Image (cartoon, rainbow, N blue to C red):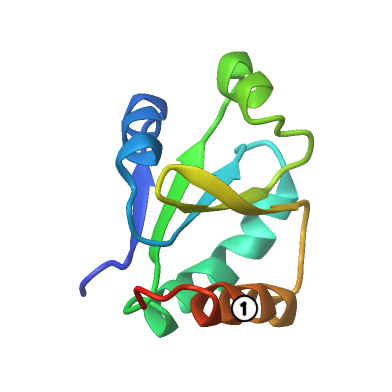
Amino acid sequence: MISYYHKLSKDDFSKKIREQQSLALFEFTVDWLGGSYIIDPIIKKLARDYRRYLDFYQINLESDSELIRTYQLNKFPTILFVKRGKIVNKIEGITSSEKLIEDIEKLIENDPIN
């Protein structure tokens, strides 16, 4: 099975976010928090459904205080939508699939490249 949902190391994330030209969703998780397990299947389904429009990545941040501070990650999971190296939307904590779809649809609609 082809995966549309890629796991990144913290080092890979730092490089990827700078180089990301197309629209992307970065999901920050921590293993010890149940919310990350709740949203994971939702993100995986969205990765299949929206693979033509967004790249999907997951970064596990087990106690990486530098990334947490740099990107002001106050709740987990946190989702950052990134385009051309800039954060264009941020969702903190557990959210519904409807809210994620709504945000993705708005970003696609406002993205002249897609």
User: At which x and y percent is residue 111?
Assistant: 47, 73
- Judging depth in this view, the residue of 19 and 46 nearest the camera is 19
User: At which x and y percent is residue 80?
Assistant: 59, 50
> Residue pushed farthest front?
112
Quick check: 3 left or right of 8? Answer: left
- Judging depth in this view, the residue of 57 and 22 nearest the camera is 22
Residue 28 sits above or below residue 23 on the image: above
Residue 91 sits above or below residue 48 on the image: above
Which quadrant is the C terminus positioned in? Answer: bottom left
Look at the numbered disc 1 and give the secondary structure of its residue.
helix
Quick check: 60 left or right of 12? Answer: right
Q: How many numbered discs, if any? A: 1
The residue located at (65%, 51%) in the rendering is 36
The residue located at (57%, 74%) in the rendering is 104
Name the residue type under label 1: Lys
* Location of mark 1 (residue): 106
Query: Badge 1: few (under 14), some or many (20 or more) residues near its Cα, within 10 Å?
Result: few
Residue 7 sits above or below residue 39 on the image: above
User: At which x and y percent is residue 22?
Assistant: 35, 60
- Judging depth in this view, the residue of 114 and 17 nearest the camera is 114
The residue located at (38%, 79%) in the rendering is 48
Instruction: Determine the image quadrant of residue 107.
Output: bottom right
- Judging depth in this view, the residue of 31 and 22 nearest the camera is 22
The residue located at (21%, 75%) in the rendering is 1
Quick check: 41 left or right of 48? Answer: right
